[in-house]
Amino acid sequence: MSDRRLKVFHAVAKLLSFTKAAEALHMTQPAVTFQVRQLEEYFNTRLFDRTHNKVNLTPAGNKVYEFADRIFDLYDEMENSVRELTGEISGALTIGASTTIAEYMLPTLLGQFKAKYPEINIRLKVSNTEGIVSMVEHNVIDLGVVEASVSNKNLIVEACHDDQLVVVTPPNHEMAKRQGAVKAEDLKAFPFICREEGSGTREVILKYLQDSGISPTDMNFCLELGSPEALKGAVEAGMGISILSRSTIAKELKLKTLCELQLDPPLSRPFSFVRQRQKFRVRVMEELLEFAKAYCESTAD
């Protein structure tokens, strides 16, 4: 039996979607379908039920999925054991990160890690926090780095960096002329630009407002945008004010195209590593986690 067929089947079984499996494996959907059919022919039975645009495992499919999980865990354990004997640190990792982290934190971190371990291949997937957590849950990625709290008990969550959020306005905005910090209550008077549903930044901001006694209906939400860059552009254009990670606005503050105001009380959130609790930890993963923790400590304010 080809390992390739089993890997493709395993991806479809995890995601219960041929389309999502094709995206995760960087394959076309017909190629994924072909590999699954080859495996079904090998076993002479259907492994998936495909009805009403839904994909479900058959009893035989469930059995193959259980064994495939164990097989790939053993592969990882075997590879790690051999590399420990030889002292070699190499392999591949797929990391997922929410947008803010992928754009402003990871490039430098991964660049330094790659310089130290050139034999390690790293793939990066970018989504919002909700999407990254889902990819970790379904074993599409080895490690996630997110910007909001994660409550799934099947996942291990380790804080790595404390991120400060601030109010951002155009330089000519009336709030920019104020002295002192801004209360949550002050934000209600102005059009407010926020991130999209599923964003960790959005979740943190809404909780902060709620803790301050302000409901979403009290706010004048005028735009929802899917990235910090788009949001900064909208604020610069005078479309509204917002709350952003301070790490995303260094360039704009230097160029004086945006102004920052501290919140009272201050607002911060942890950037966290997220991984499966039961997943066998290969040496490459251990090295990346230790490197990232040291990096975060060295760059802490």
Image (spheres, rainbow, N blue to C red):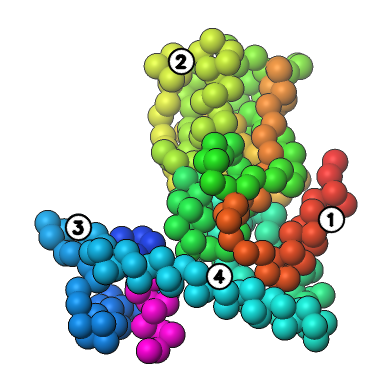
Q: CA distance from mark 2 to mark 4?
A: 46 Å
Category of crowding for the residue at label 3, using alpha-carbon neighbours closer than 10 angstroms: few (below 14), some (14–19), many (at least 20)? few
Q: Amino acid at mark 1?
A: Ala
Q: Position of residue 75 (x, y in %)?
A: 57, 78
User: Which element carries disc 4, helix, strand or loop?
Assistant: helix
User: Which element carries disc 1, helix, strand or loop?
Assistant: helix
Category of crowding for the residue at label 4, using alpha-carbon neighbours closer than 10 angstroms: few (below 14), some (14–19), many (at least 20)? some
Q: Nearer the viewer, mark 2 or mark 1?
A: 1
Q: CA distance from mark 1 to mark 4?
A: 28 Å
Check disc 1 and report the residue beneath it: 294
Vertical arrangement, residue 105 with respect to residue 119, above or below: above
Check disc 3 and report the residue beneath it: 54
Q: Is residue 8 magenta?
A: yes
Res 109 quadrant in image: bottom right
Check disc 4 and report the residue beneath it: 73
Q: Are marks 2 and 4 in contact (CB under 8 Å)?
A: no
Dominant secondary structure of the magenta stretch? Answer: helix
Q: Earlier in the sequence, mark 1 or mark 4?
A: 4
Q: Which residues are magenta?
A: 1-10
